[in-house]
Amino acid sequence: MQRLLAGLLFLSLGMVSQTVLANASAISYPEKPVRIVVPYPPGGFNDTLGRLMANKLADKLGQPFIVENKPGAGTMIGSALVAKAAPDGYTLLVNQFPFAVNPWLYPDITYDTKKDFAPVMLAGRSPMVLVVNSKSQINSVQDLLNKARAQPGAINYGSSGSGSSNHLAMALFEAMSGIKMTQIPYKGSTPLLTDLAGGSVEVAFDALPHVLPFIKGGKIRAVAVAGIQRADALPNVPTVDSSGVKGYDVSSWHGFVAPAGTPEAVIVKLNKAMNEVLQMPDVKEVFKVQGVTIDGGTAKAFGTFIDNQLALWKRVVQDGKIVAK
């Protein structure tokens, strides 16, 4: 019995020691440069977010935060790199919409999205926007639904490829409204929106930062916003939810995660600093210009958000028998 008690005491002391060390490490964190992996090429809001946060965190926490662009394989190259990194707070990932979709599109994914990452913070969201050619006779969601129901499969919609965010946004729209259209895949948003402006396809969903320049240039027209609330950048455009497809809500979102096992005290410190960065006036202005709404909040709340996204897109991908091409 004495040996057992001694063993339990030793184990308890060991656990207390580990906790004390982890907390001490968090107090002094960071003690060396931190890398932020962006799984996209330079340019675009995810890269902007990574660099903006890196500059501000360096000022706040006293160590360099260095952005590394690791594009490829639908964000899976950069994500795998972070999943396998040491869980010490010195490697972070900018994660976005594909983070919750890739597990259902790619059976050979090399990491476990649910188990290999620790949420840090949801930085912001930008709703998808339903857009048409500026000369289109489709002026509302109901116009689109009526035409699609009268001519099933006749309407061509553009996407950035099978399994892309705008493809899945339209797949969910079709499922919730009971219509059927025909997908025309493109290699990215720019060629898609260029062809939409030229009339080669009739309609598309795309992220607000992508469509804003085309809308402002008069080349395409916004029909509805895919968020539950209207977008500040498009105040006169109604939501899909209020236009006949109740509950429809699809946003392009942007956040930060770390490798699973990163000390909670480090996560809390990063989360606090990042939330403070989001309240800076110049940061707010960058988000506003890009059409992105600031979120912030706790790491736990971001974890719940990711869980909900995983469940939603699993259902859409599996019910629609969607495969990446």
Image (cartoon, rainbow, N blue to C red):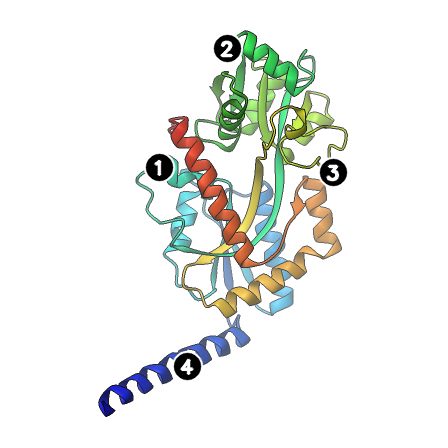
Q: Which of marks 2 and 1 is in front?
A: 2
Disc 3 residue crowd, few under 14, some 14–19, many 20+, Cα 10 Å = few
Under tag 3, what secondary structure? loop
Q: Where is residue 146 in the image (x, y as percent from the top left)?
A: 61, 12
Tell me if I can see residue 39 in this picture. Answer: no
The residue shown at (28%, 89%) is: 6
Residue 74, compared with residue 186, is above or below; it is below
Q: Mark 1 points at which residue?
A: 106
Earlier in the chain: of badge 4 and badge 2, it is 4
Label 1, label 3: how many angstroms apart (C-alpha)?
35 Å
- Give the residue type that dot 1 points to: Tyr
Earlier in the chain: of badge 1 and badge 4, it is 4
Earlier in the chain: of badge 2 and badge 1, it is 1
Label 2, label 3: how many angstroms apart (C-alpha)?
34 Å
Q: Position of residue 240 (x, y in %)?
A: 64, 28
Earlier in the chain: of badge 1 and badge 3, it is 1
Q: Name the residue under label 4.
A: 16
- Give the residue type that dot 3 points to: Asp
Tell me if I can see residue 11 in this picture. Answer: yes
Q: In which quarter of the image is the N terminus?
A: bottom left
Label 4, label 3: how many angstroms apart (C-alpha)?
49 Å
Q: Position of residue 213 (x, y in %)?
A: 68, 30
Corner quadrant of residue 22: bottom left
The residue shown at (72%, 57%) is: 280
Q: Mark 3 points at which residue?
A: 232
Cβ atoms at labels 4 and 3 below 8 Å apart: no
Position of residue 5 in the picture relative to residue 63 (left or right)? left
Label 2, label 1: how many angstroms apart (C-alpha)?
30 Å
Q: Mark 2 points at which residue?
A: 152
Earlier in the chain: of badge 2 and badge 3, it is 2
